[in-house]
Amino acid sequence: MLSQLGITLPVLAAPMAGGPTSPAMVVAAGRAGSLGMVAAGYKTAQAVEEQIRQVRAESIPFGVNIFAPNPVPVDAELYRWYAAEIQRDAVRFGLTLPAEPIEDNDSFEDKIELLLDDPVPLASFTFGIPPQRVIAALKAAGTIVVQTVTNRAEAIAARDAGVDALAVQAHTAGGHSGTLTPTEPLVPTPISTLVADITRAVELPVIAGGGLATPQAVAEVLRAGAAAAVVGTVLLRASESGASATHQAALLDPARTETVITRAFTGRPARGLRNAFIDAHEADAPWGYPAIHYLTSPLRKAAAAAGQPDFVHLWAGTGYRQATDEPTADILQRLASGL
């Protein structure tokens, strides 16, 4: 898989939706012999098309990551109660949050149509496994199809659906978990153990991620059987990162001493730096994705712009202290130095 894509640096740049992964980061990774992925989540198909155009112009290998539908329906009554609670936080920013749930599939079909009309080297999926017809069509178009999984059962299901490779994600990863069963607790399995378990069960190439922030950690997952490692949190402060200044500063804040898994911001499990919003709302937050995401999104954007990190989803994996302010290529090359 790596040779087919022309990858010589087996430490890849993870797709981080919502802004952190910029076209410049994807290009920088590709130029370094690695692979970056356009993060299609939360974007319109037209916006994704424009970012693909920018990256493709550099004649480098790249991928596109898409949220596959796997909705978590929200209880309407619980949503309204939670919306009233969050509105108390939103008032300070002059916001009125959605009073009723907003549900969608992140323009999934439009994005698939885009990738079939103008095929890309690699397409990866998270949150859900796409229909077999979609996987087959992408493969027929010459695209390598990768599925995010978090355990052996998901890996077997992805293999049976026909994917080419697996992105194996541990519970230590920053941002949303790719779990296919989001309302069930994440099992805390070390990434190397998870890789070894899955590669014994499924004969597909594995890309491993989750808390990888040092050359030693990267070398360990490759020894466990991964074909490549993928990193995200360590790139949040990179020169090419699109993460907000508020988010980047929080990674350095000595008062922020831990990451936790929370559903309070989006109604789906995600790991981020613990803050006041999580402390106030985690215990009572309802499940419900994407409805809770749309509820809190205006608040999070306003707080990030205002430099108020306690109301921002500060997504970060357990290796967040290793995030450095330097070029993406330098970070990836350093992480591969132990191979």
Image (cartoon, rainbow, N blue to C red):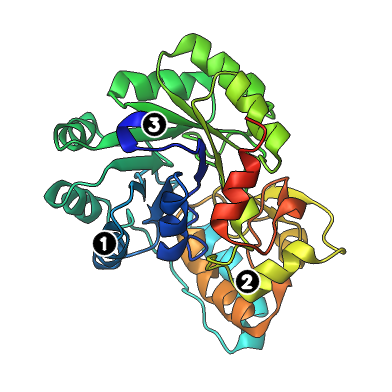
Residue marked by disc 1: 57
Q: Which residue is mark 2?
A: 86
Rendered location of residue 22, percent (x, y): 45, 64
Q: Which sits in the foreground, 23 or 337?
A: 337
Residue 280 falls left or right of residue 195? right
Q: Specify few, some or many for label 1: CA neighbours under 10 Å numbering under 14, 14-19, or 20 or more.
A: few
Give the residue furthest to the right. 255
Q: Secondary structure at mark 1?
A: loop
Instruction: Write the residue at 15% across / 35% down.
Output: 137
Q: Which mark is residue 101?
A: none
Dot 3 corresponds to which residue? Answer: 2
Residue drawn at x 32%, y 18% as measured from the top left? 160
> Label 3 neighbourhood size at 10 Å, few (<14), some (14-19), many (20+)?
some
The type of residue carrying mark 3 is Leu
Which of 207/82 is in front?
A: 207
Q: Where, quadrant-wise, is the C terminus in this rendering?
A: top right
Q: Spatial distance from mark 1 to mark 2, Cα to Cα?
A: 43 Å
Q: Which residue shows up at 49% across the image and 26% down it?
A: 227
Is 176 rendered above or below residue 149? below
Q: Secondary structure at mark 2?
A: helix
Characterize the local packing of mark 2: few (<14), some (14-19) or many (20 or more) Cα atoms within 10 angstroms: many
Query: On the image, which quarter does residue 47 sit in?
Result: bottom left
Q: CA distance from mark 3 to mark 2?
A: 45 Å
Tell me, yes or no, if residue 146 can be seen here: yes
Q: Nearer the viewer, mark 3 or mark 2?
A: 3
Number of numbered discs present?
3
Above or below for 226 versus 235: above
Q: Secondary structure at mark 3?
A: helix
- Residue 145's place in the image compared with 300, above or below, is above
